[in-house]
Amino acid sequence: MSLLCAARFDTPCRIAVQHDADALHAHLELPDGLEMGPGDRIKVHGDPVIVPFGQSVTIDRTATVEVAGPLRRAWTHVIAYFDMAELYEVSFSSGRLA
């Protein structure tokens, strides 16, 4: 276990995207029992999700979860205290898994 990253693994996930007059948002769901903590990172694999106006879509994908180690978790608490960053990081990658 390193100080920055305690574990890294792939898991299935579900992305729900809504794009209409009421909302434009994306929600990422992980499998039951898998919770994110401060400093954790998620990278969702696959092509970009494009949703035309007035529609919503739900897509199943694979994500790589990187659990924060003790140093990254502590640093995230410090910067979140001063409201300088989000507690979690989610990014998307295009293309296939390596």
Image (cartoon, rainbow, N blue to C red):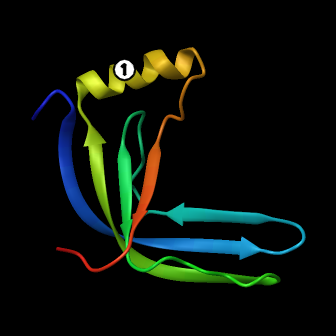
Q: Secondary structure under badge 1?
A: helix
Residue 97, placed above or below residue 10: below
The structure residue drawn at horizontal position 47% and vertical position 41%, both measured from the top left corner, is: 88
Image position, residue 43 (x, y; %): 36, 59
Q: Is residue 33 left or right of residue 3?
A: right
The structure residue drawn at horizontal position 30% and vertical position 67%, both measured from the top left corner, is: 11
Q: Nearer the viewer, residue 47 or 68?
A: 47
Q: Is residue 47 visible?
A: yes
Task: Report the residue marked by disc 1.
Answer: 75
The structure residue drawn at horizontal position 42% and vertical position 48%, both measured from the top left corner, is: 35
Image position, residue 5 (x, y; %): 20, 38
Image position, residue 84 (x, y; %): 56, 23
The structure residue drawn at horizontal position 72% and vertical position 73%, both measured from the top left corner, is: 18
As shown in the figure, which amino acid type bears the numbered disc 1? Trp
Residue 12, placed above or below residue 34: below
Identity of the residue furthest to the right in this view: 21
Q: In the rendered image, which quarter contains the N terminus? A: top left
Q: Is residue 52 left or right of residue 36?
A: right
Image position, residue 44 (x, y; %): 39, 66
Q: Nearer the viewer, residue 36 or 23?
A: 23
- Quadrant of the image occupied by residue 20: bottom right
- Quadrant of the image occupied by residue 82: top right
Q: In the rendered image, which quarter contains the C terminus? A: bottom left
Q: Nearer the viewer, residue 33 or 67?
A: 67
Identity of the residue furthest to the left in this view: 1
Q: Is residue 30 left or right of residue 68?
A: right
